[in-house]
């Protein structure tokens, strides 16, 4: 930790949050809000004189509220940076200055209430997302009585009690009588592996954390009685089984079965656990001085902010989705962004460190050559066809197109800024924009080829590369079966799907056409899929006017993690296809032929 | 222009798409006419991953009759070295100027086959893939005729697109040699240190007053039972 604080290549920004990220791989521009510390970081020697003067006493969050701290404080003894910090929400007031006792006491004059929040900007080539995890709050699991009985604690509270730097200086005590417990019961899988409450997945760390705690307890108090109530003990890592065996060897009892309820003996404040031992199918009661709930891990609440800022995706468990679960486990789908630690899923310290080193290596691999090849999927304007209407510049999410609508000079694309979504090409009324590698001609050739034989039996599906095409791949990897009538055409973004592609498909006899893309807000091209939505709304209106059934043109948002949803949509589309008669198809073809080029209406 | 070699521009010679276009002028257009192209179609069995549900031989046969297709083959594993060598050999010997690989998702192996054809002298953008595994054999496992029919369609669509593919030059951008690390827990600290020790600049952003995260709260850690900080 201290190495990170003093490394000449690391700019450490504590009390800071990333507010905005723009740009692309190799050239991200980052805005960071650094909140005021009110103590000069470089000058504070962490002597602690100020704290003694502060009259405000509040629960210490670092010790899970088991001790108290002042409004000017150091989070914990080994904190990096070591400088003290003013909790301005609890300080009696700095503007106007109400108390100010700490200022008078600080000999080095490093407390400065005139400090204000700073907005900082950086240019970076790559980003490592290590946003971590939250710890499950067991309040909802009322049968364990966490909120009702003081002697029921969570594993992280227990961790503070057993810690030499904690509120009891490492002395494990019951919270009711401050006496060391003679018997402790651990309950596993609290908030994990449940389809009903908490999280459905295994939190990965709790079994080993409990085994570790039993060993620590037995070392402190050899005579203590310890029981662990579990579903399975998952000691799969290197050296883990060894620790488990050591724990059993020291007399810790492992009982298979989770308590149905916990009651408190009102007099002694001991806890009485009713448990079905599932190995012998017998209902037992156990007494314990103290109960420790081995709480699981869950995605932090503020994850959505980072997700939206970096257009990342999340798996159904709520953690970030990697580009490939086996082959690119630390890469995100967006080039240049990597995951480290629990942001990607619950993991222990060793795994977090391994993954962090892997993501650092992946980032270095990208940055080391100094130059980066980007795909040449970019837009190009044909100046002869351009009418300088300015629509392309309006729809471009990257402001990569400039056009002077007054001087009527043709639009121009800044290639380096173009990300290749193709929305401009889809919206251009003069067909003046060529989207390299996803040209009109290429896509139309695919439509024609798909509908060459028995078009009535085919469903044309446009799928964006990042979400819905990846969702279809995920359905494949999960072996989810769906009707075989769909034919996918990949575009980089649903924004590329021009009206004329859809009309062409209907003209060639398609019974059903589906446009699919990333969920609104998750678009890989900032907000290009807003234009998809607008375009489809326009088309549905036109279809109504022409007397066509507008359901035959579908719009679905399917994320890369939603294989099941892809399967559902395909099944639904096939049901819809079966309702479209040959007669309806020929009628549609006739109507569209009569209405020449309806897309230019 | 029968062989793709003449259109290939080594990537290190390219600085930007625009400058290349100016220099080479008609480079983009030269590949456009589709009547004269020589396409190679390669249908991959992926062991039994595809072949169990799709009649790969029949797919390759039907592709052979499509306009512009010069060779059409099927093979056990195209991503393997012998598989890739098969494609490279054909590019050289048969003068192929476009390649269609019908195998797994392009999200997995497009880079592999782009690299493969560029080693044989073709521009990497003259590759098209048909996704017969994730979007055909794996999702229609119990309906071989329908899966085979779909596979044929997907290959026909890929060939149609391939006829119209153009060589593209990749843009090179300068990369800023620094990293933003969001979060100063054990993972963020480790990533930041590895990068910084290797000479990269790192901005480590932590929302709390101190780095350390959950790890700093722990007493002993498994499996070594030593302290966490």
Image (cartoon, helix red, strand yellow):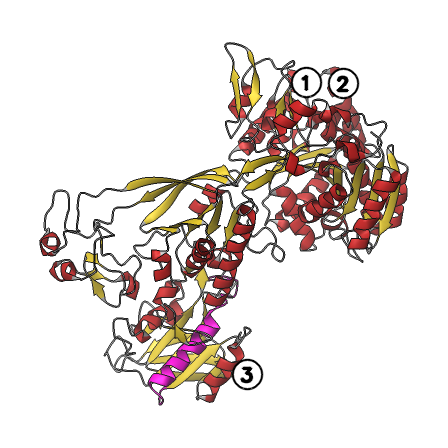
Residue A304 location (% of width, % of height): 45, 47
The front one of A230 and A353 is A353
Disc 3 secondary structure class: loop
Query: Which region is colored magenta?
Result: A196-224
* Residue assigned mark 1: A598
> In what quadrant of the picture does the N terminus of chain B appear?
top right
Residue A211, magenta (yes or no): yes
* Residue assigned mark 3: A279
Disc 1 secondary structure class: helix
Q: Quadrant of residue B119?
A: top right
Real-space Cα separation, disc 1 to disc 3, in angstroms: 72 Å
Q: Quadrant of residue A488?
A: top right
**Chain for disc number 3:** A
First in residue order: circle 2 vs circle 1: 2
Give above or below for B176 relative to A192. Answer: above
Are there few (<14), some (14-19), or many (20+) residues within 10 Å of tag 2? few
First in residue order: circle 1 vs circle 3: 3
- Tag shown at residue A593: 2
> In what quadrant of the picture does the C terminus of chain B appear?
bottom left
Residue B95 location (% of width, % of height): 86, 37
Residue A122, magenta (yes or no): no
First in residue order: circle 3 vs circle 2: 3
**Chain for disc number 1:** A
Q: Going by the picture, which residue comes out furthest to the top? A: A407
Q: Going by the picture, which residue comes out furthest to the front? A: B13
Residue B178 location (% of width, % of height): 46, 46
* Contact between labelled residues 2 and 3, with CB atoms less than 8 Å apart: no
Q: Is residue B30 left or right of residue A173?
A: right
| Mark 2 and mark 1 on one chain | yes
Residue A171 visible from this viewpoint? yes
């Amino acid at each position: 930790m201290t190495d990170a604080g003093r490394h000449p290549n690391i700019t450490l920004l504590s009390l800071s949050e990333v507010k905005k990220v723009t740009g692309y791989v190799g050239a991200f521009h980052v805005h960071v809000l650094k909140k005021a510390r009110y103590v000069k970081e470089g000058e504070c020697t962490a002597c602690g004189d100020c704290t003694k003067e502060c009259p405000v006493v509040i629960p210490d969050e670092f010790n899970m509220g088991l001790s108290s701290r002042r409004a000017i404080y150091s989070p914990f003894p080994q904190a990096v940076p070591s400088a003290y910090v003013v909790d301005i929400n609890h300080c009696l007031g700095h503007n106007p200055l109400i108390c100010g006792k700490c200022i008078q006491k600080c000999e080095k004059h490093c407390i400065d209430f005139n400090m204000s929040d700073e907005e900082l900007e950086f240019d970076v080539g790559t980003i490592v997302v290590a946003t971590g995890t939250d710890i499950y709050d067991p309040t909802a699991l009322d049968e364990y009585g966490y909120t009702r009985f003081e002697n029921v604690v969570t594993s992280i509270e227990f961790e503070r009690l057993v810690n030499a730097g904690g509120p009891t200086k490492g002395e494990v005590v019951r919270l009711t009588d401050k006496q060391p417990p003679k018997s402790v019961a651990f309950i596993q899988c609290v908030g994990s592996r449940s389809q009903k409450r908490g999280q459905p997945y295994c939190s990965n760390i709790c079994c080993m954390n409990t085994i570790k705690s039993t060993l620590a307890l037995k070392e402190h108090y050899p005579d203590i009685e310890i029981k662990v109530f579990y579903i399975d003990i998952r000691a799969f890592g290197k050296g883990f089984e060894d620790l488990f065996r050591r724990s059993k060897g020291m007399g810790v009892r492992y009982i298979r079965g989770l308590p149905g309820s916990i009651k408190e003996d009102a007099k002694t404040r001991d806890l009485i656990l009713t448990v079905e031992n599932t190995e012998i199918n017998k209902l037992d009661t156990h007494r314990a001085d103290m109960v420790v709930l081995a709480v699981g891990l869950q995605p932090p609440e503020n994850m959505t902010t980072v997700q939206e800022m970096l257009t990342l995706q999340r798996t159904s468990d709520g953690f970030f989705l990697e580009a490939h679960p086996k082959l690119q486990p630390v890469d995100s789908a967006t080039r240049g962004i990597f995951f480290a630690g629990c942001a990607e899923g619950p993991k222990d310290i060793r795994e977090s460190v391994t993954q962090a080193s892997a993501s650092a290596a992946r980032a270095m691999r990208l940055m080391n050559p100094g130059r980066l090849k980007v795909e040449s999927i970019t837009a190009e304007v044909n100046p002869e066809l351009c009418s300088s209407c300015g629509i392309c510049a309006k729809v471009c999410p990257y402001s990569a197109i400039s056009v002077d609508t007054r001087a009527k000079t043709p639009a121009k694309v800044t290639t380096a800024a173009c990300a290749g979504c193709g929305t401009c090409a889809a919206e251009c009324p003069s067909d003046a924009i060529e989207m390299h590698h996803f040209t009109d001609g290429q896509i139309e050739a695919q439509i024609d080829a798909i509908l060459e034989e028995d078009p009535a039996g085919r469903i044309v599906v446009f799928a964006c590369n990042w979400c819905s095409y990846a969702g279809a791949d995920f359905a494949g990897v999960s072996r989810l079966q769906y009707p075989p009538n769909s034919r996918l055409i990949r575009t980089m973004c649903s924004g590329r799907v021009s009206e004329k592609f859809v009309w062409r498909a209907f003209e060639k006899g398609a019974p059903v056409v589906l446009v699919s893309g990333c969920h609104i807000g998750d678009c890989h091209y900032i907000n290009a899929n807003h234009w998809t939505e607008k375009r489809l709304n326009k088309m549905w209106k036109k279809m109504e006017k022409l007397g066509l059934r507008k359901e035959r043109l579908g719009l679905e948002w399917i994320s890369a993690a939603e294989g099941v949803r892809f399967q559902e949509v395909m099944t639904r589309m096939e049901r819809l296809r079966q309702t479209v008669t040959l007669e309806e198809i020929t009628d549609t073809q006739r109507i569209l032929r009569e209405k020449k080029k309806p897309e230019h209406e | 222009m029968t062989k793709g070699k003449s259109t290939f521009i080594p990537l290190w010679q390219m600085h930007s798409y625009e400058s290349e276009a100016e220099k080479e002028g008609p480079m983009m257009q030269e590949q456009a006419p589709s009547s004269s192209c020589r396409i190679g179609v390669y249908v991959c069995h992926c062991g039994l991953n595809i072949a169990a549900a799709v009649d790969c031989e029949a797919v390759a046969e039907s592709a052979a009759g499509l306009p512009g297709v010069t060779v059409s083959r099927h093979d056990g594993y195209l991503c393997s070295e012998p598989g890739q060598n098969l494609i490279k050999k054909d590019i050289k010997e048969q003068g192929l100027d476009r390649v269609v690989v019908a195998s797994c998702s392009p999200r997995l192996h497009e880079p592999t086959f782009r690299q493969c054809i560029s080693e044989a002298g073709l521009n990497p953008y003259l590759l098209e893939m048909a996704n017969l595994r994730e979007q055909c054999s794996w999702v229609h496992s119990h309906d071989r005729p329908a899966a085979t029919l779909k596979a044929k369609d997907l290959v026909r669509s890929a060939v149609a697109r391939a006829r119209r593919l153009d060589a593209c030059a990749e843009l090179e951008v300068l990369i800023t040699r620094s990293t933003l690390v969001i979060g100063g827990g054990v993972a963020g600290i480790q990533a930041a240190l590895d990068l910084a020790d290797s000479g990269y600049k790192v901005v480590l952003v932590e929302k709390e007053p101190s780095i350390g995260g959950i790890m700093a709260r722990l007493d002993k850690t498994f499996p070594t039972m030593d302290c966490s900080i």
